[in-house]
Image (spheres, grey):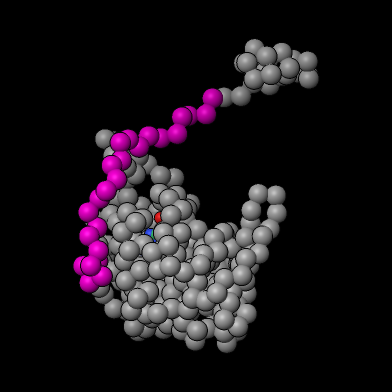
Amino acid sequence: MKILVPVKRVLDYNVKPRVKADGSGVDLANVKMSINPFDEIAVEEAVRLKEKGIASEVVVVSIGGAKSSETLRSALAMGADRAIHVLSESEVEPLAVAKILKGVAGEEAPDLVILGKQAIDDDSNQVGQMLAALIGRPQGTFASKVEVEGDAVLVTREVDGGLETVKLALPAVVTTDLRLNEPRYASLPNIMKAKSKPLSTKAPADYGVDTAARLTVLKVVEPAVRQAGVKVPDVEALVEKLKELGVA
Ligand code: AMP
């Protein structure tokens, strides 16, 4: 079984985003970037399937600027075998990402594609679903458990009020939720080993995809500053205060 894992380079989740002065987006100059946390979970899941002898190869792919190769190297250090870097210095929107991934899937013929449920920079939550539609394969989104059973995969999903398990015929598309696993830290020897693992570079045009923007960002603003709270002496005063604020 071959597993394809798309990984995106995003603003590190510990970094507080700063909006650019002109409100056109988030300032990414000189800030720490990392592998999207949900994609790290996807890599971990794929590597675990390989360690269990279920998967034979884990291929990671990233679409982005030159530095996305660093993100791919960290996925290789976690245990992926091979990487594909689809180089694009301009931002690639979710539909174009899904179209490129369709091209990669066409060449690689993976049995399973495991993506993150969303990229934490734009929170789109679109690529996995669109890829499944484009390649005409079943999807199991927000997975909290993944079990391969013969030529099918059982995906347990976190839904409102409980868990749902779906059975998908392979090849299939799965997207990861936070509780699927806890990704490992790459060891120093594995970081060194990752440097010599194969990484091929492609362009969106190799897959016939035009990455011109279709979406227009109107404005990006910082969240409103939180108002200071007030202390109330007792429950009556609390109810009074809530009435005063029009929330009770
Ligand atoms: P999104 O729909 O943009 O929230 O992203 C969902 C998932 O699609 C991510 O967790 C990644 O697995 C994958 N993905 C999105 N953008 C990229 C990209 N530029 N390169 C590789 N994978 C991506």
Does the magenta segment cover residue 103? no
Q: Residue at x 29, y 50 (%)?
A: 29
Please name the predominant secondary structure of the magenta segment in the image.
loop
Furthest residue toward front: 136
Q: Bounds of the magenta span?
A: 204-227
Q: Using the image as rendered, state which of residue 9 and residue 97 is in the foreground.
A: 97
| Residue 135 image point, x, y percent | 40, 68
**Observer able to see residue 186:** no
Q: Using the image as rendered, state which of residue 61 and residue 143 is in the foreground.
A: 143
Q: Using the image as rendered, state which of residue 55 and residue 85 is in the foreground.
A: 55
| Residue 155 image point, x, y percent | 61, 67
Residue 142, quarter of the rendered image: bottom right
Residue 99, quarter of the rendered image: bottom left
In which quadrant of this rendering is ligand 1 seen?
A: bottom left
Going by the image, does 145 lie left or right of 205?
A: right
| Residue 32 image point, x, y percent | 38, 56
In the displayed structure, 67 sits above or below 221; it is below
Residue 63, quarter of the rendered image: bottom left
Does the magenta segment cover residue 212? yes
Q: Residue at x 68, y 21 (%)?
A: 231
Q: Residue at x 57, y 71 (%)?
A: 168
**Observer able to see residue 111:** yes
Q: Residue at x 50, y 58 (%)?
A: 117
Name the quarter where the C terminus is drawn: top right
Going by the image, does 39 lie left or right of 183?
A: left
| Residue 151 image point, x, y percent | 57, 81
